[in-house]
Image (cartoon, grey):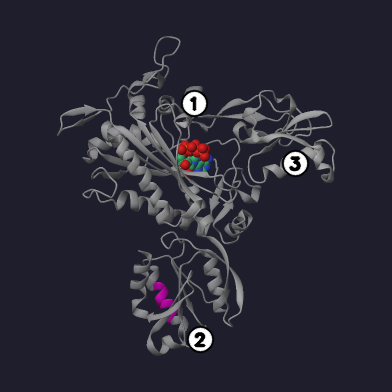
Amino acid sequence: MEMDKLVALCKRRGFLFQSSEIYGGLNGFWDYGPLGVELKRNVKEAWWRDMVAGHDDLATLPGAPGPYAMTGLDCAIIMHPQVWKCSGHYDLFHDYMVDCRESKKRYRYDQVQGRWVEAKGQRIFVAVPSGEKEDEQIEQRALKYFNLRAKHAEELHWDGPVVSLTTVKDFSQVLGPDAKELGTLTPPREFNLMFKTTVGALGGEEDVAFLRPETAQGIFVNFKNVIDSSRVRIPFGIAQMGKSFRNEITPRYFTFRSREFEQMEIEFFCHPRQSPEWYRYWRDRRYAWYVGLGLAGERLRLRDHSPEELSHYSCGTADIEYAFPFLAKGEFGELEGIAHRGDFDLRSHMEGKLVRKGNELVVEMGPDGKPRHKGSGKDLSYFDDQTRERYIPHVIEPSAGADRATLAFLCEAYCEDKVPDENGKLTERVVLRLHPRLAPIKAAVFPLVNKDGMPEIAQKLYRELKREFNVFYDDKGAVGRRYRRQDEAGTPYCFTIDGQTLQDNTVTIRDRDTLKQERLPLAEVAHRLHELLR
Ligand code: ATP
């Protein structure tokens, strides 16, 4: 599937628009249109239902070490600045960037790729932003730089494969991604990804606050509140979904890397001894969730991090990744990370920002011999009144992005095929094969023609269904065209009122994927739709 086609469909049918488009847009920000808002709501609703609201805390689910409870939370986006100092985001949440003195563009250091090449007695590193067809782009840029025609491409002597700019020590021989001359890239510099804002009218340095870059910290700082107010016992999880903000250096790939996005995060608190089992449980459970909603096959994978990749506090992390069509062949993009975080977060908010010393996590000290970032001093340990044991729980964190999941479901669903029209002739159609739970519109209702009492029956059915489902009424144009319009929106079922309805009170139901049509009594439509969407 070509990404351009999906992007065009998203705009044409109202899934996604560039933010502030009439003013030229704002890079890294997106708006969900009428269909998009329903789709994303359904993704979030499916997550909340499956993980939180519909969770059976009396049963032991397959693969789980035992029964557990789940509860939710909805925290403020702006929190006390100390939260981000103790969590490590203030000091460590940065990417490296390089600037180009010539083009004035800025790139994420690790996202610039390139290749060494020699021609006309000169050896240079030709850089491009990482992405599709890097090889071709690099060759074209090299030809241009050396002033060679395509037919003289054999004069370019390549030295090694495409590698990251991070492998290059000296930038003097680097041709930046948008530069004409060599050596225009600055050395890499740290760039904190948190958006800053000011709280209150005075606006001094001490009033600086941050927009949260993740929802997780709101859960940790409320751990005690939840325990004290809701009678949950360990093991249990707290879930939260909501907006997060990161001032990404290079937002790109449609909504994949945005500056404002939504996360769906769970912090699962358990006894340290049981934490490896819970980690495995959540890793597998979250993978199965995506499969159940339609992502499958070789495009979805669960990848365990190698020990070198693990964060300093983590004893295990896995990513659920999807082979998005905008990535180079063989590359995958992260949908969700599942991390075993030990007691790092709760301890940080008790004691202050932690650093690793050998095998231990210790409070980081400043030059004055005091903690660099002081914790809350509150006791965030847990007392198990049955075993009479007090301990700091370990945490498993499945952290997903609602926008990335939505984008993956869209990419997976997009399909072009040929279907017979009313006269049996094969015609092209675009169809979104979204899982019925995710489809923005669950069913459409059509009167075959706008006469003979058909519209009245169709409107009655529409109103009845509308009470429970998001349904759509359409009486414009040939019925075949109406089907096509619903196929593009991903609507799984269409009900048509026709001549026979007037005689025997039956309607046709047409299935988006199989194209099968069958008749069923008008009175059974709502019940059938229930069954189909379950
Ligand atoms: P990446 O390496 O792609 O920047 P990350 O490892 O920093 O992601 P996490 O901090 O683990 O991401 O965030 C959890 C989830 O939040 C990600 O798996 C992703 O789905 C989502 N997410 C993170 N950053 C963005 C973003 N800029 N735009 C959209 N979604 C994002």
User: To which residue does mark 2 refer?
Assistant: 451
Residue 224 vertical position relative to residue 530 in the rendered view, above or below: above
Name the residue at 40% across, 68% down.
466
Residue lying at the far top in this picture: please name it. Answer: 368
Specify which label sits upstream in the sequence, 2 or 3: 3
Specify which label sits upstream in the sequence, 2 or 1: 1
Q: Say whether residue 285 is magenta.
A: no
Residue 306 vertical position relative to residue 439 in the rendered view, above or below: above
Picture coordinates of residue 404, whole percent (x, y): 50, 47
* Viewport quadrant of the N terminus: bottom right
2 or 3: mark nearer the eye: 3
User: To which residue does mark 1 refer?
Assistant: 92
Residue placed most toward the observer, 96 or 153: 153
Extent of the magenta region: 457-463
Residue 271 visible in the displayed image: no
* Discs 1, 3 touching: Cβ within 8 Å: no
Q: CA distance from mark 2 to mark 3?
A: 64 Å
Would residue 277 be found to the left or right of residue 385 on screen? right
Residue 348 vertical position relative to residue 262 in the rendered view, above or below: above
Q: Secondary structure at mark 2?
A: loop
Residue 411 visible in the displayed image: yes
Q: CA distance from mark 1 to mark 3?
A: 37 Å
Name the residue at 51% across, 32% down.
194
Picture coordinates of residue 245, whole percent (x, y): 50, 38
Residue 139 is tagged as: 3
Q: Quadrant of residue 411?
A: bottom right
Picture coordinates of residue 344, whole percent (x, y): 36, 27
Badge 3 amino acid: Glu
- By secondary structure, the bulk of the magenta-drawn segment is best described as helix
Badge 2 amino acid: Lys
Residue placed most toward the observer, 30 or 164: 164
Residue 518 vertical position relative to residue 323 in the rendered view, above or below: below
